[in-house]
Image (cartoon, rainbow, N blue to C red):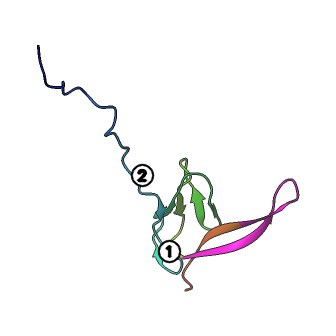
Amino acid sequence: MAHTKSGGSTKLGRDSISKRLGVKVNNGQTVNAGGVIIRQRGTYFSAGKNVRKGGDDTLYAVTAGTVRIASKRKTRFDGTPAKIKLVTVEAPSK
Protein backbone atom coordinates (compact mmCIF):
# COMPACT_ATOMS: atom_id res chain seq x y z
CA MET A 1 0.00 0.00 0.00
CA ALA A 2 1.37 3.39 -0.98
CA HIS A 3 2.08 5.85 1.82
CA THR A 4 2.70 9.01 -0.29
CA LYS A 5 -0.01 11.31 -1.58
CA SER A 6 -0.62 11.12 -5.27
CA GLY A 7 0.52 14.15 -7.30
CA GLY A 8 -2.85 14.76 -8.87
CA SER A 9 -3.77 17.71 -11.07
CA THR A 10 -4.74 21.07 -9.67
CA LYS A 11 -7.58 23.33 -10.67
CA LEU A 12 -5.46 26.46 -10.20
CA GLY A 13 -2.69 27.94 -12.30
CA ARG A 14 -4.63 29.26 -15.29
CA ASP A 15 -4.57 32.93 -16.24
CA SER A 16 -5.61 34.76 -19.39
CA ILE A 17 -3.11 36.79 -21.37
CA SER A 18 -3.38 40.57 -21.02
CA LYS A 19 -5.09 42.41 -23.87
CA ARG A 20 -2.84 45.50 -23.84
CA LEU A 21 -5.73 47.95 -23.61
CA GLY A 22 -5.42 51.67 -22.95
CA VAL A 23 -4.28 54.95 -24.45
CA LYS A 24 -1.59 54.43 -27.11
CA VAL A 25 -1.23 58.06 -28.30
CA ASN A 26 -1.80 60.71 -25.67
CA ASN A 27 -3.09 64.29 -25.80
CA GLY A 28 -0.83 66.56 -27.87
CA GLN A 29 1.08 63.76 -29.59
CA THR A 30 1.06 63.24 -33.35
CA VAL A 31 -0.48 60.23 -35.06
CA ASN A 32 -0.40 58.91 -38.62
CA ALA A 33 -3.49 58.05 -40.63
CA GLY A 34 -4.76 54.63 -39.54
CA GLY A 35 -2.80 54.73 -36.29
CA VAL A 36 -4.42 53.31 -33.15
CA ILE A 37 -5.12 55.99 -30.55
CA ILE A 38 -6.99 54.03 -27.85
CA ARG A 39 -7.73 50.32 -27.37
CA GLN A 40 -10.76 49.87 -25.15
CA ARG A 41 -13.69 47.65 -24.24
CA GLY A 42 -16.91 49.61 -24.50
CA THR A 43 -17.02 53.33 -25.26
CA TYR A 44 -15.20 54.95 -22.35
CA PHE A 45 -13.76 57.37 -24.96
CA SER A 46 -15.90 58.59 -27.87
CA ALA A 47 -14.76 59.23 -31.43
CA GLY A 48 -14.71 62.85 -32.56
CA LYS A 49 -13.52 64.60 -35.72
CA ASN A 50 -11.10 62.57 -37.89
CA VAL A 51 -11.42 59.55 -35.55
CA ARG A 52 -13.30 56.32 -36.23
CA LYS A 53 -14.35 53.44 -33.96
CA GLY A 54 -13.43 49.87 -34.93
CA GLY A 55 -15.47 46.73 -34.35
CA ASP A 56 -13.76 46.08 -31.00
CA ASP A 57 -14.30 49.75 -29.94
CA THR A 58 -10.70 50.69 -30.81
CA LEU A 59 -10.34 54.36 -31.76
CA TYR A 60 -8.07 55.08 -34.73
CA ALA A 61 -7.09 58.16 -36.74
CA VAL A 62 -8.51 58.78 -40.21
CA THR A 63 -6.02 61.55 -41.03
CA ALA A 64 -2.55 62.37 -39.74
CA GLY A 65 -2.39 65.09 -37.12
CA THR A 66 -2.35 65.95 -33.42
CA VAL A 67 -4.50 64.06 -30.91
CA ARG A 68 -6.77 66.10 -28.64
CA ILE A 69 -8.69 64.55 -25.74
CA ALA A 70 -11.34 66.76 -24.15
CA SER A 71 -14.20 66.37 -21.69
CA LYS A 72 -17.59 67.42 -22.99
CA ARG A 73 -21.10 67.53 -21.57
CA LYS A 74 -23.65 65.56 -23.56
CA THR A 75 -27.36 65.02 -23.01
CA ARG A 76 -28.49 61.41 -22.91
CA PHE A 77 -31.63 60.25 -24.68
CA ASP A 78 -33.61 60.49 -21.43
CA GLY A 79 -32.52 64.09 -20.86
CA THR A 80 -29.94 63.48 -18.14
CA PRO A 81 -26.52 65.13 -18.60
CA ALA A 82 -23.38 63.05 -18.99
CA LYS A 83 -19.68 63.85 -19.21
CA ILE A 84 -17.92 62.14 -22.10
CA LYS A 85 -14.29 62.06 -23.17
CA LEU A 86 -14.06 63.05 -26.83
CA VAL A 87 -11.01 62.14 -28.92
CA THR A 88 -10.31 64.24 -32.02
CA VAL A 89 -7.40 64.54 -34.44
CA GLU A 90 -6.50 68.03 -35.64
CA ALA A 91 -4.94 68.05 -39.10
CA PRO A 92 -1.68 70.03 -39.29
CA SER A 93 -2.11 73.58 -40.60
CA LYS A 94 -0.50 74.27 -43.96
Front-most of 25 and 83?
83
Frontmost residue, 8 versus 55: 8
Can you give x and y, in whole percent of width and height, for residue 60 in the image? 52, 61
As drawn, which residue projects farthest toward the top?
1
Label 1 amino acid? Asn
Residue at (29% x, 31% y) in the render: 10
Residue at the far bottom: name it. Answer: 94
Mark nearest the camera among 2 and 1 is: 2
The relative height of residue 56 versus residue 62 in the rendered view (above or below) is: above
Q: Secondary structure at mark 2?
A: loop
> What distance separates the C-alpha of mark 2 from that of mark 1?
19 Å
Image quarter where the C terminus lies is: bottom right
Measured as percent of width and height from the top left, residue 88 is found at 61, 71
* Label 1 CA crowd tier, 10 Å (few <14, some 14–19, many 20+): some
Please state the horizontal and vertical placement of residue 28, each as a whole percent of the image: 52, 81
Residue to which mark 2 is pinned? 19
The image quarter containing residue 46 is: bottom right
Q: Give the class, few, some or many, for how many residues have Cα within 10 Å of label 2's Cα (few <14, many ≥20).
A: few
Labelled disc at residue 66:
none
The residue positioned 54% from the left and 81% from the top of the image is: 92
Image point (14%, 25%), residue name: 4
Q: Which residues are magenta?
A: 67-83
Name which of mark 2 and mark 1 comes first in the sequence.
2
- Between 54 and 77, the one lying in front of the other is 77
Residue 74 shown left or right of residue 4 in the figure:
right
Q: Main secondary structure of the magenta part?
A: strand
Q: Amino acid at mark 2?
A: Lys
| Residue indicated by mark 1 | 26
- On-image quarter of the N terminus: top left
> In the rendered view, does 91 fall on the left or right side of 35?
right
Horizontally, residue 4 falls left or right of residue 42, namely left
